[in-house]
Image (spheres, rainbow, N blue to C red):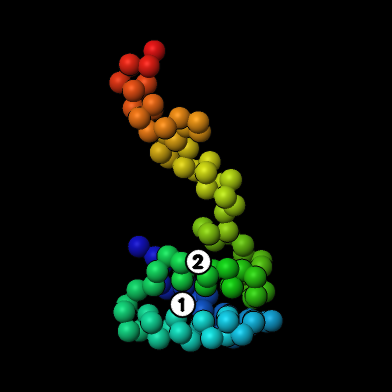
């Protein structure tokens, strides 16, 4: 579950100290606030966009740069390998056959 307190802090920082926001970002933040009040949750994509804006457009975010979505694609793939046992070049069925001992 997302940490909505942290997300609110990021939104506050963007509104208070955000610099060089483009038109879309300026419109996005109030829209997100309204959607959260109406629905009570935000999508993963919306949260990722808030984190990106915070990281790129606020002094706080530039210093911290330790948000989960700040991971590179390579880091995400590495985490996937570590957590799910994904093996590049092998399909799920090939991995399953090997795990059951049929592939040896």
Q: Earlier in the sequence, mark 2 or mark 1?
A: 1
Quadrant hosting residue 98: top left
**With respect to residue 90, does 45 lie above or below?**
below
* Distance from Cα at disc 2 to Cα at disc 1: 13 Å
- Screen quadrant of the N terminus: bottom left
In the picture provided, is 3 more to the left or to the right than 88?
A: left
Task: Give percent across and percent down for residue 77.
Answer: 52, 44
Q: Which of 14 and 87 is in front in this view?
A: 87
Q: Which of 53 and 66 is in front in this view?
A: 53
Task: Give percent across and percent down for residue 25.
Answer: 58, 80
Task: Give percent across and percent down for residue 3.
Answer: 41, 67
Tag 1, which secondary structure? helix
Tag 2, which secondary structure? helix
Residue at image position (56%, 46%) is: 75
Q: Dot 1: within a 10 Å radius of its alpha carbon, few (fewer than 14), some, or many (20 or more) residues?
A: few
Q: Nearer the viewer, residue 99 or 90?
A: 90
- Label number found at residue 95: none
Task: Give percent across and percent down for residue 13.
Answer: 57, 80
In the picture provided, is 53 more to the left or to the right than 32?
A: right
Residue at image position (42%, 73%) is: 5
Residue with the most extreme top position: 104
Name the residue carrying label 2.
Answer: 48
Residue at image position (38%, 33%) is: 92
Residue at image position (46%, 42%) is: 80
Name the residue carrying label 1.
Answer: 8
Instruction: Give the label, 2 or 1, closer to the camera.
Output: 2
Q: How many marks?
A: 2
Q: Do the residues labelled 2 and 1 touch (CB within 8 Å)?
A: no
């Amino acid at each position: 579950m997302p940490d909505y307190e942290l997300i609110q802090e990021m939104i506050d920082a963007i509104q208070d100290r955000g610099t060089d926001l483009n038109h879309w970002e300026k419109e996005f933040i109030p829209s997100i606030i309204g959607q959260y009040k109406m629905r009570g949750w935000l999508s993963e994509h919306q949260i990722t966009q808030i984190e990106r804006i915070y990281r790129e457009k606020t002094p706080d975010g530039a210093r911290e740069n330790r948000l989960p979505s700040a991971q590179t694609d390579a880091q995400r793939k590495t985490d996937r390998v570590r957590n799910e046992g994904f093996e590049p070049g092998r399909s799920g069925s090939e991995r399953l056959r090997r795990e059951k001992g049929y592939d040896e």
